[in-house]
Image: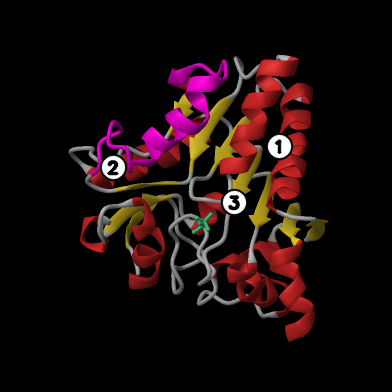
């Protein structure tokens, strides 16, 4: 795993966006794996600014998001479909029909999982997957203890993940208890992975990722087995690391 140190959140976002823009310019039909949460917001803002200023085109790009809450429709402001439309897709020239997010309100959720995995495979797989990391090491919504063999599946969210995401909802009770997520095996099949880590809250996770063992109790550790992972971490995430280690 290659680690790039960014000065701060803005710098991390710019470096990651520039990385993605280079890939899209070089491969206009690239299949991108996308993430939600607080971390990638700055990247998406940079992609939009670049699209407006330099005209980088996403017309041939296909996107697959990592996960979605079960029970929320795509028009619910807390759904990840809404997040993606609002924070990226509505502001660039990607074709909406080529943007995929699992449907959290599908009638048959198990079938939705199987179909989503097939969809990714039928498109030839993901070329570049953008990832964040939870403080507990989760990637996507794959919580500690998830088998490394999993494909897209239904998960029960842990109390700590629901707590961490409660900031977007009116109350903790409103945070869904289940989600659909690409599995660890699905993520590992991406040809390349770009992992973003920002802030002191993530230092422990970064520390464990860099110096710990590969262990299903810390899902992100599986990335050590992937041949092509780049981590962009800001100083806040790295600074304490030096103090702790
Ligand atoms: P965050 O979430 O970007 O909101 O910190 C990352 C994650 O939980 O994967």
Specify whether residue 30 is in view. no
Q: Which mark is residue 44?
A: none
Mark 2 vs 1, N-terminal side: 1
Q: Position of residue 47 (x, y in %)?
A: 65, 29
Q: CA distance from mark 2 to mark 1?
A: 28 Å
Nearest to the observer: residue 112 or residue 161: 161
Q: Is residue 189 above or below residue 239?
A: above
Please report the residue visible at 79 percent of the width from the left and 79 percent of the height from the top.
242
- The answer for how far apart the CA atoms under marks 3 and 1 are is 13 Å
Q: Nearer the viewer, residue 214 or 61?
A: 61
Examine the structure image and report whether residue 80 is included in the region drawn in magenta: yes
Quarter of the view holding residue 16: top right
Circles 2 and 1 in contact, beta carbons < 8 Å: no
Q: Horizontal placement of 81 versus 75: left or right?
A: right
Query: Can you give x and y, in whole percent of width and height, for residue 60 in the image?
Result: 61, 17
The location of residue 176, given as percent across then percent down, is 26, 55
- Considering depth in this image, is 102 or 57 the residue closer to the camera? 57
Residue at numbered disc 3: 131
x 44%, y 28%: residue = 85
Image quadrant where one finds the C terminus: bottom right
Residue identifier under label 2: 104
Q: Which label was assigned to residue 17?
A: 1
Cβ of mark 3 under 8 A from ligand 1:
yes
Q: Which residue range is magenta in the image?
A: 72-97
Q: Quadrant of the N terminus?
A: bottom right
* Secondary-structure class at tag 1: helix
Tags 3 and 2 touching, CB below 8 Å: no
Residue 19 part of the magenta segment: no
């Amino acid at each position: 795993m290659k680690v790039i140190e960014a000065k701060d959140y803005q710098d991390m976002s710019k470096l990651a966006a520039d990385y993605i823009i280079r890939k899209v310019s070089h491969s206009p039909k690239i299949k991108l794996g996308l993430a939600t949460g607080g971390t990638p917001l700055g990247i998406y803002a940079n992609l939009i600014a670049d699209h407006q200023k330099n005209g980088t085109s996403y017309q041939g790009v296909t996107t697959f998001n990592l996960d979605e809450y079960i029970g929320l429709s795509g028009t619910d402001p807390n759904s990840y479909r809404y997040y993606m439309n609002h924070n990226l897709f509505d502001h660039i020239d990607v074709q909406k029909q080529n943007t995929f997010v699992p449907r959290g309100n599908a009638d048959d959720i198990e079938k939705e999982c199987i179909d989503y995995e097939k969809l990714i495979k039928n498109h030839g797989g993901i070329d570049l997957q953008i990832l964040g990391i939870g403080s507990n090491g989760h990637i996507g919504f794959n919580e500690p203890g998830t088998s490394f063999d999993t494909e897209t599946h239904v998960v029960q969210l842990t109390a700590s993940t629901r707590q961490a995401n409660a900031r977007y909802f009116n109350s903790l009770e409103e945070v869904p208890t289940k989600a659909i997520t690409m599995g660890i095996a699905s993520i590992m099949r991406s040809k390349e992975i770009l992992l973003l880590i920002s802030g002191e809250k993530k230092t422990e996770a970064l520390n464990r990722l860099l110096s710990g063992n590969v262990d299903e109790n810390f899902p992100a550790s599986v990335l050590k087995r992937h041949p092509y992972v780049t981590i962009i971490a800001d100083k806040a995430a790295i600074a304490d690391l030096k103090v702790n280690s």
